[in-house]
Image (cartoon, coloured by chain):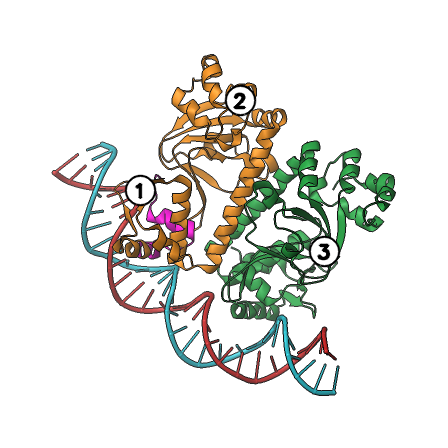
Chain colours: A orange, B green, C cyan, D red
Amino acid sequence: MNPTITTINQSFGWRMLGDNPMLSDAELALLRDVELFDGLAPEQAAQISRRLVRRTFPAGTNLMSVEQPGEVVYIILSGTVKIHVEQADGTDVIIAMLGAGDTVGEMSLIDSAGRSATVVTQEESTLLWMNRTAFLEALQNAPVITLNLVRMLSSRLRLANEQIQALATLDVHGRVARQLLAFAQKYGHPDEAGTVQIPIRLTQSDLAGLVGASRERVNQVIGYFKQRRYLSVDQHYHISLHNLEALAKRIK
Amino acid sequence: MNPTITTINQSFGWRMLGDNPMLSDAELALLRDVELFDGLAPEQAAQISRRLVRRTFPAGTNLMSVEQPGEVVYIILSGTVKIHVEQADGTDVIIAMLGAGDTVGEMSLIDSAGRSATVVTQEESTLLWMNRTAFLEALQNAPVITLNLVRMLSSRLRLANEQIQALATLDVHGRVARQLLAFAQKYGHPDEAGTVQIPIRLTQSDLAGLVGASRERVNQVIGYFKQRRYLSVDQHYHISLHNLEALAKRIK
DNA sequence: GGGCAAGTGTGAGCTAGCTAACAGCCGCTT
DNA sequence: AAGCGGCTGTTAGCTAGCTCACACTTGCCC
């Protein structure tokens, strides 16, 4: 995605031994895939990388209680994070599931409207974070970042609009199919046989929260898709899609 | 919203006599309320205003067919514009209704993903427009604009997320109530008696498209609200809300 | 001023999906 | 190895909301 940033790794990696937990080479390599830093000049990248702190959280950590809401931007290096709103009856509405390369929390930094949603790690996850001032400085010093931000928000808004359209027009079969295809597109690794695995722990309740349906209904729908070999689920709740066309047909 | 930009009107208004249809004083005053130009320095504002063209369209104009999609940014001075996707069965899903001060089309300029939605004027509407290069130059020359853009996208995304949550959890009563309150908040003028009028032509089909329900169901819900004097509708399809608390209660 | 297009109002009948209630099952923890 | 928390699977019964169908009003265009 961004060739220039690979140089952090070579030119500046060792510098971070000082005041930060050092990022491993593998982790620095992942920085290349962080959309927010795409196209950054090496010097700027270096400066920013010095203000990034790495931290690994166990599954189920509520990131909002780790730091003050609206004070930190997280960048996901590995793992998955669920952004959701809890309902009175204990069910969740899931706004988004984000994975490696995604950025969390920049919205509250910008408009400082309080966060209404909860952010929880789904698996053990390694994140980088940056405090408010570092982030705002970065925006100041590197206009590319602001542009990247605009692009990211713009594409999230597009996805949100698609989601709205899906909720307004599709039945539960269609909504589940659409959601799975969206994940496959964003995070999936297609294998030789045309199967795409979604490397996110996804329970049926999660899916229900994502598509705005009851857990029971989602169970039936998943059963239906499994029976037809459109998909399969492994013991760690990772879903593999075997027949993308068939699923796509449900979206109309 | 932005006091500095008022100076366009005094210092530069006359200059536009040259190659552009001149903007009236009243229209220039409206520029103050354009979020995109908030906080712009007078010189920059002047430069930009020279690249803006004003145009008035009758109700029902499809703006996508006036200009190439993805080539123009519109700024709404007066009137309302509906962004929607047409379904196979002739019904609409309405993504957004935008009014004075709002900006249309910047997303496609940024990520140049094609426009999927249709944009239509609801009433006679006066818009300013700016072509792709003028817009990109403005972003280059005035970083404030990029920041404003980030802020705008961020708040639209927030609204979209609220909409998703509403679709996933509320029944049609709740969704209609929420939608009306959102409009009241954004465009409403409260009067002495605590009534808020929504200055947008809103048919029941429009509402149905906005909340993802059938026209018939919306009819019933509106009837219910009318009966209880929560709202009333005038002959031009303008809805007035008389009991905000009662409506808010439906949102839970 | 007659007719048509666009919108509201209403009812009958049907169904997708909800709620509630349990019965497995699997894998961690002690 | 026993027990428990978390997740899947399934069913019965109910209802909100959909579809279809049609009558009524209003404003607008020719």
Q: Is residue A20 left or right of residue B135?
A: left
Q: Earlier in the sequence, mark 1 or mark 2?
A: 2
The Cα atoms of the two marked residues, 1 and 2, are separated by: 35 Å
Residue beneath label 2, please? A45
Q: Secondary structure at mark 2?
A: helix
Chain identity of mark 2:
A
Q: Is residue B82 left or right of residue B192?
A: left
Q: Is residue A131 left or right of residue B65?
A: left
Which residue corresponds to the image point at 43% horizontal and 28% vertical from the top-left? A127
Which residues fall within the magenta stretch? Answer: A196-220
Chain identity of mark 3:
B
Q: Position of residue C18 (x, y in %)?
A: 39, 59
Q: Secondary structure at mark 1?
A: loop
Q: Quadrant of residue A197?
A: top left
Residue beneath label 1, please? A238
B36 is higher (above) or lower (below) than A19: below
Residue beneath label 3, please? B189
Q: Position of residue A193 (x, y in %)?
A: 28, 43
Q: Secondary structure at mark 3?
A: strand
Q: Nearer the viewer, residue A138 or A197?
A: A197
Please name the amino acid that badge 2 sits on.
Answer: Ala
